[in-house]
Image: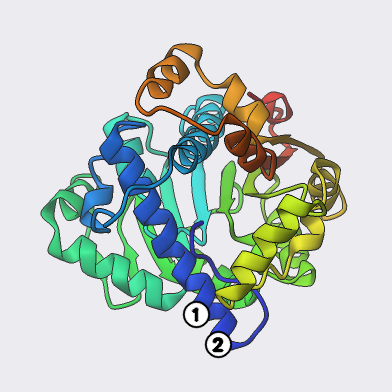
């Protein structure tokens, strides 16, 4: 999971959520080292895991990374990159650098996360030339602005903010050049589930009210009412990690309804079994040879309990509601 700005208001809960940022990055780094996908940048943010990750975990992360990236690439295609991307609860995500390498950068790429996580990310960027150079290469104009809790360059900005404090977040985003009239893709991976239903609804409504042309992509748990879902919840609770927003994760329909009841024109959702099966078949064949998978049922259970859901608003008639796998 990626660390975002979430759950109840207690510091302990927030601290536990921040810890999920490291979990996600370590799992991604391991899967990359085995060869599931290419990411030459993650090594600069996180050390290699001390122990092997199970093959089903690696395949789950592969499906997540490829699935979200596929929707992102489709949005960039529909808008011909004349758009902005806002990654909410971005953690140590490396998408900006990967988009630059693929010549797919939007007009501007924004990240939002807790100030403590942002400070860590900025420290890595400042001290590692393979991270800072691509930002400099895409920057034009005056000197690049970077301090302990924010970065602002021509194509990439990072701000420290709490997603529950929308006014503050919006002000900070506008200060670094967010343009509400530009087609906007918002991404949240394992973020809304840590916020109370009231806060996540406020965030979705804020996005729907702010951007007339937008797509919101959400990756998180689903089908949480069954026994497997209950065990997942209990395991996280043991780490003081409370899934405050789990009621929206009861089914694919509850994920869709949350978008539709908060100002989005159209919405859809797929569990990760469906997403996994719809990824390019030649690449699936490649990754399935990387490691022997003993427990096919366990992978299916895992994929069945995560989903990608997305909502769209399309004032420019770009055909955003037609984007799917």
Residue at (66%, 40%) from the top-left corner? 301
| Label 2 CA crowd tier, 10 Å (few <14, some 14–19, many 20+) | few
Verify CB contact (< 8 Å) between mark 2 and mark 1. Answer: yes
Q: Which mark is residue 74?
A: none
Label 1: element kind: helix
Tell me if I can see residue 113 in this picture: no
Horizontal side of residue 197 vs 182, given as left or right: right
Where, by quadrant of the figure, is residue 164 drawn? bottom right
| Label 1 CA crowd tier, 10 Å (few <14, some 14–19, many 20+) | some
Q: Residue 124: x, y in percent?
A: 22, 64
Tell me if I can see residue 267 in this picture: yes
Label 2: element kind: helix
Where, by quadrant of the figure, is residue 204 drawn? bottom right
* Residue designated by label 2: 11
The C terminus - image quarter: top right
Q: Which mark is residue 15?
A: 1
Nearest to the observer: residue 200 or residue 33: 33
Residue at (70%, 36%) from the top-left corner? 271
Q: Residue 104: x, y in percent?
A: 38, 32
Q: Residue furthest top?
A: 282
Nearest to the observer: residue 246 or residue 135: 246
Horizontal side of residue 27 vs 244, given as left or right: left
Horizontal side of residue 191 vs 141, given as left or right: right
Is residue 201 placed above or below 240 in the rendered structure? above
Q: Residue 272: x, y in percent?
A: 63, 35
């Amino acid at each position: 999971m990626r660390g975002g700005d979430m759950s109840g208001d207690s510091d302990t809960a927030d601290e536990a959520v921040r810890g999920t940022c490291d979990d996600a990055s370590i799992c991604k780094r391991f899967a990359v080292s085995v060869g599931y996908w290419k990411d030459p940048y993650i090594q600069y943010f996180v050390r290699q895991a001390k122990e092997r990750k199970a093959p089903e975990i690696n395949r789950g992360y592969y499906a997540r990374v490829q699935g979200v990236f596929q929707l992102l690439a489709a949005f960039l295609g529909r808008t011909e990159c004349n758009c902005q991307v806002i990654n909410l609860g971005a953690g140590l995500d490396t998408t900006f650098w990967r988009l630059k390498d693929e010549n797919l950068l939007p007009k501007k790429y924004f990240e939002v996360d807790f100030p403590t996580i942002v400070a860590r990310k900025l420290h890595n960027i400042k001290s590692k030339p393979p991270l800072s150079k691509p930002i400099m290469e895409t920057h034009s104009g005056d000197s690049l602005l970077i301090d302990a809790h924010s970065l602002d360059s021509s194509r990439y900005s990072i701000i420290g903010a709490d997603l529950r404090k929308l006014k503050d977040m919006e002000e900070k985003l506008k200060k670094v050049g967010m343009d509400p009239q530009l087609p906007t893709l918002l991404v949240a991976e394992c973020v809304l589930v840590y916020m109370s239903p009231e806060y996540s609804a406020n965030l979705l409504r804020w996005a729907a009210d702010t951007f007339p042309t937008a797509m919101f992509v959400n990756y998180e748990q689903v089908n949480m009412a069954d026994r497997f879902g209950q065990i997942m919840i209990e395991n996280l609770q043991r780490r003081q990690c409370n899934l405050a927003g789990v009621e929206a994760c009861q089914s694919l329909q509850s994920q869709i309804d949350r978008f539709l009841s908060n100002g989005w024109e159209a919405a859809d959702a797929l569990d990760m079994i469906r997403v996994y099966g719809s990824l390019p078949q030649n690449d699936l064949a490649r990754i399935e040879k990387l490691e022997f998978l003993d427990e096919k049922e366990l992978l299916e259970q895992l994929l069945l309990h995560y989903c990608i859901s997305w909502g769209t608003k399309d004032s420019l008639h770009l055909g955003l509601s037609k984007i799917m796998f």
